[in-house]
Image: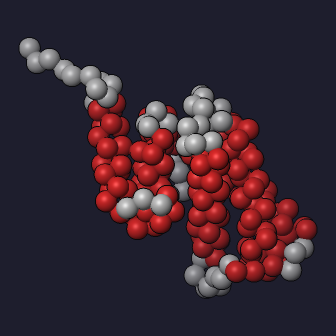
Amino acid sequence: MDIVQIIEGCKRKETRCQKILYERFFGCALKIAFRYVYQYDSAVNVTNDGFVKLFRHIEKFNYKEDDFPEQQLMSWIKRIIVKTSIDELRRNKMTPEIVDIPENVWEEVSENQDADQSILYKKLITHVKNLPPIHRIVFNMFVIDGFTHFNIANTLDISVAASELNLSCARGIIQKIINGHQPGETRLSG
């Protein structure tokens, strides 16, 4: 069954199509949720809540059949999962518990991603999870999920300048980690 048939079946509330869509995109959606909510059970709950929202509102999803509808759907799923993750963080006062990332979250490799990219992505996410919550959220939204500063500002109810500042701070912290020293640590030249 192709993606257009699945989408149209979901719009008609066909359980079979909903199941196919859920199973096809669950792994990717879970990875997105896990970048924001670092507790596995909470990330699974966020992912499931996101799919509930998706199925409730799928009739609003418009796509161009001749313009990669699967990519359009994935972008829409990404926005839903990110917003659902942020809602979860707000309920928990934006201080999620940080835990190790379970290996099974990384098992599903994108068809466009080779092993080296997967390892680099995993390292980046490990560094990102150690950022202060607001830096982590803005970094994820801008760098990884492709939101604009305007979209981030609207979603988080902050100014565009605050979004830009948080991204700059996040990049600076990650750069220091990559260069071999922890944030706040000064190196002595000698």
Relative placement, left or right, of 19 versus 67 is: right
| Quarter the C terminus occupies | top left
**Where in the figure is residue 23, as x and y percent of width and height?**
79, 56
Find the residue positioned furthest to the right. 15
Find the residue positioned furthest to the left. 190
Specify the quadrant of the image occupied by residue 43.
top right
Name the foreground residue: 54 vs 7: 54
Name the foreground residue: 2 vs 9: 9
| Quarter the N terminus occupies | bottom right
**Where in the figure is residue 146, as x and y percent of width and height?**
46, 62
Q: Is residue 184 above or below residue 147?
A: above
The answer to whether any part of residue 1 appears in the image is no
Q: Is residue 43 above or below residue 9?
A: above
Relative placement, left or right, of 86 versus 123 is: right
Q: Residue at x 19, y 20 (%)?
A: 187
Find the residue positioned furthest to the top. 190
Relative placement, left or right, of 111 versus 144 is: right
Name the foreground residue: 57 vs 74: 57
Q: Residue at x 81, y 79 (%)?
A: 11
Q: Residue at x 76, y 53 (%)?
A: 48
**Where in the figure is residue 169, as x and y percent of width and height?**
31, 44
**Where in the figure is residue 59, as x and y percent of width and height?**
75, 80
